[in-house]
Amino acid sequence: MQNDFLHSARFRELEKRHRVLTKELAALGWLTDGSVTPNHPGCWRWTRKVRARTVQVSLSAAQAELFKSAIANHRRLEAILREIRAISQEVLLNSAESVRQKSTAKTS
């Protein structure tokens, strides 16, 4: 019976991991996408896509460090979201009775 899943060790493991991930989300800090690359000595460039166009902004070294951190946070956010989605899908699929699928194999 699928409702047994809600009382299983696997469900408790998934629920615990979900709680850890949501706490990590709350602690991420500033976020932005794109990349930071050196432009010329002492100057940096932040590059990102805006409405299918590449946009570049010149940054100071101090700004570049802040943006690098925010970009790393954004990448971690995306990884966390992928994992939360996978956990959610497993729990949702196993938490209620599913539709019985008819076999599509033909017998001769």
Image (cartoon, helix red, strand yellow):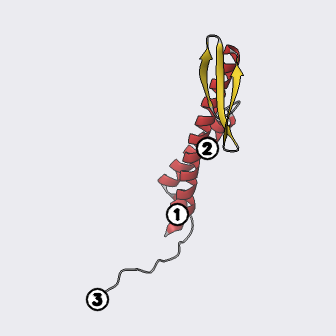
Indicate the quadrant containing the C terminus: top left, top right, bottom left or bottom right.
bottom left
Tell me the quarter of the picture where residue 33 sits. top right
- Residue drawn at x 62%, y 18% is 39
- Residue drawn at x 61%, y 10% is 41
> Which one is nearer the viewer's eye here, 89 or 50?
50
Residue tagged 2: 19
Compared across the picture, whether 24 is left or right of 100 comes to right
Give the residue type that dot 1 points to.
Answer: Asn
Mark 2 → mark 3, Cα distance in angstroms: 51 Å
Residue 15 percent coordinates (x, y): 57, 49
Residue 78 percent coordinates (x, y): 60, 41
Give the residue type that dot 3 points to.
Answer: Ser
Residue tagged 3: 108
* Numbered disc 1: secondary structure: helix
Label drawn at residue 11:
none
Residue tagged 1: 94
- Residue drawn at x 66%, y 26% is 46
* Numbered disc 3: secondary structure: loop
Mark 3 → mark 1, Cα distance in angstroms: 34 Å
Tell me the quarter of the picture where residue 66 sits. top right
| Contact, mark 3 vs mark 1 (Cβ under 8 Å) | no
Outermost residue to the top: 41
Compared across the picture, whether 101 is left or right of 47 comes to left
> Which one is nearer the viewer's eye here, 80 or 4?
80
* Numbered disc 2: secondary structure: helix
